[in-house]
Amino acid sequence: MSRIVVQGNTRVEDETVRSYVLIVPGKSFTNADIDESVKALYGTGLFSDVNITISGNALLVVVSENRVVKSVIIKGNKKVKNDELFALLQTKPRGVATEAKIQGDVQRITDYYATQGRSAATVTYEVTDLPDNRVDVVYIIDEGDRTAIGRITFVGNNAFSESRLRSVITSRKRSLLTLLNRKDVFNEAKLAADQEALRRFYMSHGYADFRVISVDWDYDEASSRYSVVFTLDEGARYHFSTIDIDSTIPGIDTRRLMRLVKTRPGRIFDSREVEQTVEDMTIELSRAGYSFVQVRPRGDRDYENHTISITYLIDEGPRIYVERIEIYGNTKTRDYVIRREFDLSEGDPYNRVLVDRAERNLRNLGYFKTVDIQTEPGSAPDKVILVVRVEEESTGEFSVGAGISTDGLVAEISLDERNFLGRGQRLRVSVGFGADQQQYSISFTDPYFLGYNVSAGVDAYKTIQNRSSYRPYMNEIIGGGLRLGLPITDNLVLDLNYKINQKTISQTKKQTAAYFPNGVYLTSSAGYELTYSTLDNNLDPREGMWLNGAQDFAGLGGDVSYMRSIAEARYYQQIMPDKDVVGVVRVAGGNITGLNDDVPVYDNFFKGGETVRGFESYGYGPVDIATGTHVGGKNYWVATAEVQFPFPGISPDFGFRGAFFADAGNEFDVDVPKGAGPVNNANQIRSSVGGSVMWASPIGTLRADMAYVLSKAKTDKEQWFRFSAGRTF
């Protein structure tokens, strides 16, 4: 064979076709070479048919080119925007039209509609032939009715109520609330995630044998609703018994590693504690030079006594290295934002625990709908490739908030971008306004400042506080600050900050001018804040604690110098897990001490009904006897005990919960300016009891508190009913 002849091509050059043929003129070849050449040409996606034959002393390559797409049209979609659908398509203008691509597009559109709650949607297509081997591709959509979940039930649950289990899963049955948040959408993938959520929940509460026997659903065409049934086998509740560490690697001090063990004999079995222990040990040993260490927990059940003994096995794992990390799907987010969540990089020893940790970190960023990390063989037996696939989600939010409370009407407009320019930085701009106050603010946060695991941020704001029944002056505050966040452990964070603000007090009432003199006052301060949290859910906690302590030191220039200290502790515990009854205890307190001079009254603490219900805002504490004006206090403390429960007689899916509470607190001690006073310090405990109704409504969380005051001072101002509402969308 002396030459290669190409026929049938109109758009593709002859040389392009020849470049994919694996046969060289003048050299011998086999039928296998012809077959491989045909495969290579098909693999280009340029041809719908390829035929290679021998004609005399020539190799004849006859091709039929795939048609070129002139335009892609989508019809029938009203509930889903064109941009969302076009992003799914592989068939694009000026690309080639193949049956496989078009069929794939049909399936992707159908699947996407299913995620939007329209499982009954159908998609067909038409291909219109045009001159010059071109075509128009039209996708025709019948969206159908929205298919939602009408009922969710659990079978086999004895330890936890249906309301508690519904709070664990993400699927929701249709209600007024789900009309906005779309959590009632029926989606098989979401149901699979719900099964895993239930497993992790039960395993973290002692039920080591728990399993989901089945998830069944039934579709009612008349109502376009699904009924979903989770059938569970809870098993027995286990406690930890003996805890041990067994190492096969010489030189490892297992006694020192015991300090990392979260599991304790006698405590309820919690799979989260086991997982955290494995992770902490792996990281500690890796830092100590044991790069290929492998920590595995072995649980031995005592079925009769319902206990589990845990042995952490430490072995030398296979010597495998990470050849490279490949990232796909991040069209906006920069690669380095993803890579910095890994505790390993190219060339490091491979460790599955660290990979799982990175996957969890990426999910927690809130930038991605899905995160999947898989391993593929590398260029050698001792090398692997980490393949990271992500699907991005919207990280920008425009929100309009509106609320009404017993303090008046409040509204806010904000722009919040959690992944600014794809760099993982956060930018927030907000404007708030109400009857007595307007506020403007902007903040910027970089969670990895200069590439280190340290967050840094800058803030600026302006607040205008008008005169009101409880504020006898107008106050304009312009300020800003710098902050650094240093993670000490997974649960403990240290924040350092510098703040500066200028207060302009004006229009002071003559009777209170000694307390709030007109003028301009500059405050410059530095401080720190420590926060420790073990909450199971930051938005709706049921277990765990939250501790916070902060101090500010003013006097770095400016007109005032003081030390302000505040602390708060909250503890959540399920009192009756099977009934979803949660107990909450909260204590808080603060002190401000002048370093050189008295503390100005406007820097005092001003507490009220937001801390001890049953009182107005600024409703208790020291009062000027002559005018009745509350002048705040240099010290305060508050305490709350509350029991939260599902609202009786109403399905948990409607979002109602009730609470009974008892509040107590006090605000006291004030530096009385010259020419002012006398002041009734009223250093006595204020207390109240009451009940609350809370509703997670479509317009936000509504809360109504009704309180009866048990103890107060004569000068305090009561308010038995307090209502608040808000919305973000």
Image: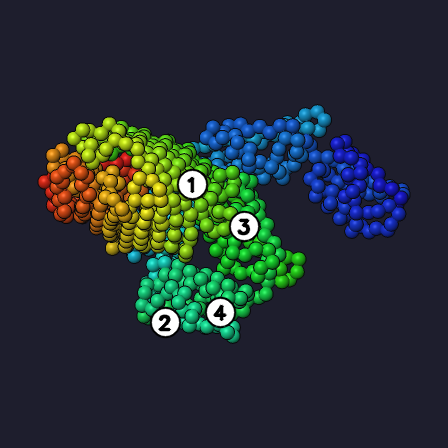
Q: Earlier in the sequence, mark 1 or mark 2?
A: 2
- Disc 1 marks a residue whose amino acid type is Val
| Cα distance between the residues tagged 1 and 4 | 45 Å
Q: Is residue 651 left or right of residue 215?
A: left
For label 1, the residue is 458
| Cα distance between the residues tagged 4 and 3 | 28 Å
**Residue 398 placed where, x, y %?**
41, 33
| Cα distance between the residues tagged 4 and 2 | 17 Å
**Residue under the point 60% across and 60% down:** 321
Q: Earlier in the sequence, mark 2 or mark 3?
A: 2
| Cα distance between the residues tagged 3 and 1 | 25 Å
Q: Is residue 178 above or below residue 383?
A: above
For label 3, the residue is 339
**Residue under the point 30% across and 44% down:** 561
Assess disc 3: are there few (<14), some (14-19) or many (≥20) residues with their C-alpha within 10 Å of its C-alpha.
Answer: some
Q: How many labels does the image show?
A: 4
Q: Could you tell me if residue 85 is visible in this image?
A: yes
Assess disc 1: are there few (<14), some (14-19) or many (≥20) residues with their C-alpha within 10 Å of its C-alpha.
Answer: some
Q: In this view, does 367 lie to the left or right of 628?
A: right
Q: Earlier in the sequence, mark 3 or mark 1?
A: 3
**Residue 75 placed where, x, y %?**
53, 27
For label 4, the residue is 314
Q: In this view, does 638 lie to the left or right of 365?
A: left
Q: Could you tell me if residue 185 is visible in this image?
A: no
Of tags 1 and 2, the one toward the viewer is 1
Secondary structure found at label 3: helix
Assess disc 4: are there few (<14), some (14-19) or many (≥20) residues with their C-alpha within 10 Å of its C-alpha.
Answer: many
- Disc 2 marks a residue whose amino acid type is Thr
**Residue under the point 45% across and 47% down:** 455
Q: Which of marks 4 and 3 is nearer the N terminus?
A: 4
For label 2, the residue is 242
**Residue 543 placed where, x, y %?**
31, 54
